Image: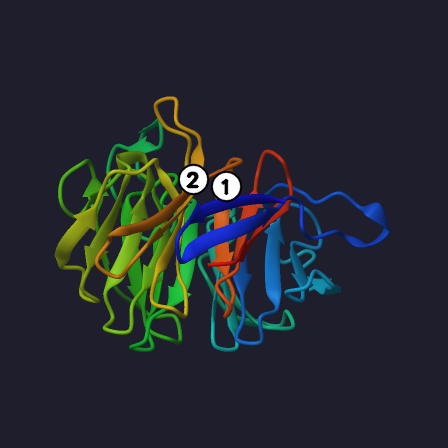
């Protein structure tokens, strides 16, 4: 097996680690996430959309058939799975075994953001127009990045009441060109993967701009591990391959590992990384050795 990474962040790469029962192929994989018990949830564009394995690769079950048309974002906080259904413009949370807890948006109803060219909208609008990620914040509110045909972050109360939205289309501070993923730190700061601007923007819970990380391919996904580091799935860029990148809480790059085209990245309690692949329709596992 290939050894990649550096120093404390050295990994053994195991391609196509998970296998579906009966040799079934995966659909396009949008996201991968681990729960507190190190069960790994693979979010695929195929019914059933959520497939669950243990960290050793044993298939545990699947759920969500008929609930999600176009799987995009998936994050796990505590005992809740937060998802977005991109083309139906719905953000929906589930229990760990697949029971619906909260649904935001009306299926197939999109806010008016005008023309869209290369994912850049004419104007920002309310929820939703092809949302990308949903996640609960330490303050109990829920934040949703609304990205493919909008340029906003929306904040909701835990029971689904819209509190505020921020963002406009563009390249400036607090502007977005395809906000694609979201993560939080224990102090409540929001880390928004502003994909087509090739940066991570950092905000207060109220939406105040605090800073940004640059020097990356378009970030498809950002996940904060239990070690306090951030794991970022970067797109191919300017002749460079896709990368799985690890940054500390200050944004310093700790390791950057070439990958197949990776759209979602999850990390378990031992620091092993799971890379969800869209084009190759599998999950590569990076087993931490350092």
- Is 268 in front, or is 180? 268
Query: Is the N terminus in the top left, top right, bottom left or bottom right quadrant?
Result: top right
- 63 in relation to 117, above or below: below
Q: Residue 183: x, y in percent?
A: 35, 60
Circle number at residue 243: 2
In the rendered structure, the answer to whether residue 261 lies left or right of residue 141 reads right
Residue drawn at x 63%, y 58% is: 67
Q: Residue 253: x, y in percent?
A: 29, 49
Residue 73 appears in view:
no
- Residue 2 falls in which quadrant of the image? top right
Q: Residue 221: x, y in percent?
A: 41, 49
SS for dot 2: strand
In the rendered structure, the answer to whether residue 38 lies left or right of residue 215 reads right
Residue drawn at x 59%, y 45% is: 29
Q: Which residue is mark 1?
A: 262
Q: Earlier in the sequence, mark 2 or mark 1?
A: 2
């Amino acid at each position: 097996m290939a050894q990649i990474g550096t120093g404390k962040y050295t990994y053994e790469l195991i391609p196509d680690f998970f296998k579906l029962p009966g040799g079934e192929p995966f659909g396009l994989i949008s996201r991968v996430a681990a729960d507190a018990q190190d069960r790994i949830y693979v979010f695929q564009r195929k019914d059933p959309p959520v497939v669950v394995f243990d960290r050793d690769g044993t298939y545990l079950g699947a759920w969500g058939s008929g609930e999600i048309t176009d799987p995009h974002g998936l994050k796990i906080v505590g005992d809740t799975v937060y998802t977005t259904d991109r083309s139906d413009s719905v953000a929906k949370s589930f229990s760990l075994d697949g029971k619906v807890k909260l649904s935001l948006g009306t299926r197939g109803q999109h806010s008016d953001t005008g023309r869209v060219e290369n994912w850049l909208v004419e104007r920002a609008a309310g929820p939703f127009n092809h949302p990308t990620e949903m996640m609960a914040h330490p303050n109990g509110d829920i934040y949703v990045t609304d990205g493919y045909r909008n340029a906003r972050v929306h904040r909701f109360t835990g029971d689904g009441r819209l509190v505020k939205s921020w963002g406009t289309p563009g390249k400036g501070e607090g502007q977005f060109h395809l906000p694609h993923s979201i993560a939080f730190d224990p102090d409540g700061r929001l880390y928004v993967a502003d994909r087509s601007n090739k940066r991570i923007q950092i905000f207060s819970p109220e939406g105040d701009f605090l800073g940004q990380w640059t020097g990356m391919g378009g970030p498809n996904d950002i996940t904060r591990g239990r070690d306090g580091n951030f794991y970022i799935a970067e797109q191919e860029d300017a002749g460079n391959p896709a990368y799985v990148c690890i940054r500390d809480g200050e944004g310093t790059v700790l390791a950057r590992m070439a990958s197949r085209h990776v759209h979602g990245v999850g990390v378990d309690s031992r620091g092993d990384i799971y890379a969800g692949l869209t084009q190759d329709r599998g999950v590569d596992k990076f087993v931490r050795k350092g």
